[in-house]
Amino acid sequence: MASDHCSLSSYSRCTTKHLNLHLNVDFIRRVISGKVELTVEALEDRFSALTLDTRDLKIISVKTNGQAARFSLGPKHSFKGTPLEIVLPFDLSRGQHVIVEVTYETSPSSTALQWLSAEQTAGKKHPYLFSQCQATHCRSMVPCQDTPSIKHTYYAQVSVPQDLVALMSAVRDGQTADPQDSSRIVYKFRQTVPMPSYLIAIVVGALESRVIGPRSRVWSEKEFVDKAAFEFSETETMLKTAEDLAGPYVWGQYDILVLPPSFPYGGMENPCLTFATPTLLAGDKSLSNVIAHEISHSWTGNLVTNKTWEHFWLNEGHTVYLERMIGRSMEGEQFRQFDAMGGWKDLQDSVNTFGANNPLTNLVPNLQEVDPDDAFSTVPYEKGFTLLYHLEELLGGPEVFMGFIKAYIQLFAYSSVTTEEWKNYLFTYFKDKVDILNKVDWNSWMFTPGMPPVKPQYDTTLADACISLSQRWIKAKDQDLNSFSESDVKTLSSPQMIEFLSLLLQEDPLPLTHVMKMQQVYDLNSYLNSEIRFSWLRLCVRAKWDDAVPLALKMATEQGRMKFTRPLFREVYNFEKFQEEAVRTFIANRAAMHPVTAGLVSKDLKVDAIITTNL
């Protein structure tokens, strides 16, 4: 079995089949307390002890099949947490099951949980809780075998204050008054499709929902719910398109939850309940491709899962490929090509940030003693997609290659895979084209840092207008600036505006005169689309426009999506005149940020180093 460098649990000796959670959410103390019953199957004879992953959990008691069991916590590792060693009062034979019941409490500083005060929500009246377990944070919420190589079903009962609603990454299964406390409600959930621990998710808040399709609702605070219902109204079309491409949707319900702004990702593919950032609410559905991405994860990631985080590209590269195939079905091949061009630039950006020789830019990195959060970037997404697109071109085009992807999903459904297993199946499926596959430089693609060994030639039809406009600005002398007018951008779609700005970000910084003129003729400060605003503000800060700094720091702090927050802080930090301002603003807002975001921005701005040297 592939060894998982990110887990301390005894996953090679036993496997969790089912979790039964009984949770009590305490907003005053900012903890979840309760118990989990794990149904564990022995994978060897004379099995008498097991280890679970935990991080900052208070373990109160452990029982096995109802009998008290001895337990101890091992030494704490910097990011893997603390192993919970449990000794069974009996031996099991291979294939036998035991129910391990752990009563525990989370820490207020659990890395999986973000507790928001009422002031940090849109409604300002009620507190809010949400989880983010990917990659290795579930262990700070539930004692478990926190590795994607193990999949299990789960049931849950969650007690919350009666004016709040609880949701999980599972099918809702009713609610009852809490027999222990009449001011609380118990919500019940069941997830009957086996899934890895990182997909366990919980949210508690003043939530409302709207029906947006036969198997879909959108959930959020009431301030966002109608906006979200409009923005994501094409969800059922995307689901049906994905089913045509990849096979039946097995999870039953597909709901979308729009979170408060501090959610650190664009989306998170929690089964039955995709989490989405409010920065997608552009008002024109132009950013709903993120939902196509999360829908695609229902097959690649959730149904077929990377066995360890080294193989994360199997989740993300295939999901980007499927997302763009949905776009192709709905918008045409030119749209897919245009989207892929944008992805190549995002990849270039990540490689530049990490450095072209950084081993974390390998498609399959070595994560021994590396926190997977530190390795997170667009590399597995876009380098992974580029490899799949390159193979598509070599092996006969999108229809032929999609046949392989569908077969791969069917073969490995409900299990976890490594890159080697994926590659072996690729060679089996295309057994009549092995000579072509043998010419692929697999070592360069998989295990070499930097950009891919092959750059695809994408169709530039939709990009040509963006390319020519960006070139005009790059080549313009000061005396040419009056040749630009509002009409330059009138016919550009939102994705084309994003492309135009990202092309400018690929070049040397524009002179300040040019950026000021661009604002004058295009009024880019008035755009509400978060992707356009983000690229525009980066461009302004790079051009050393003082007036843009407060706007960039405002965007970096009024939402917490890492894709926006980290680069905006970095741009201001690199503008030497405002370096201290960037650090000050971060320190003032750090407490309101998601712990993962705060940790990574503090590394970007070298804040902990500054604090240490000033002591």
Image: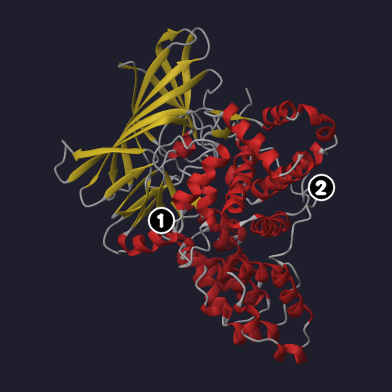
Query: Which secondary structure lies at badge 2?
Result: loop
**Do we see residue 300 in this rendering?**
no
Front residue of 323/107: it is: 323
Amino acid type for the residue under numbered disc 2? Pro
The answer to whether 409 is drawn above or below residue 522 in the figure is above
Residue 471 at what x, y percent from top left? 76, 75
10 Å crowding of disc 1: few (<14), some (14-19), many (20+): many
Callouts 2 and 1 close, C-beta under 8 Å: no
Task: Please indicate, yes or no, whether residue 267 appears anywhere in the rendered image.
Answer: yes
Amino acid type of the residue that numbered disc 1 sits on in the rendered structure: Val
Badge 2: how crowded within 10 Å, few (<14), some, or many (20+)? some
SS under mark 1: strand
Q: Say which quadrant the C terminus sits in.
A: bottom right
Give coordinates of residue 177: x percent, y percent: 17, 40
Answer above or below: position of 465 versus 258: below
Q: Nearer the viewer, residue 23 or 584?
A: 23
Q: Position of residue 109 (x, y in %)?
A: 41, 47
**Mark 2 sits on what residue?**
453
Residue at x 68% of width, y 65% of height:
462
Mark 1 sits on what residue?
A: 258
Asked where in the image residue 222 lies, by quadrant, the reply is: bottom left
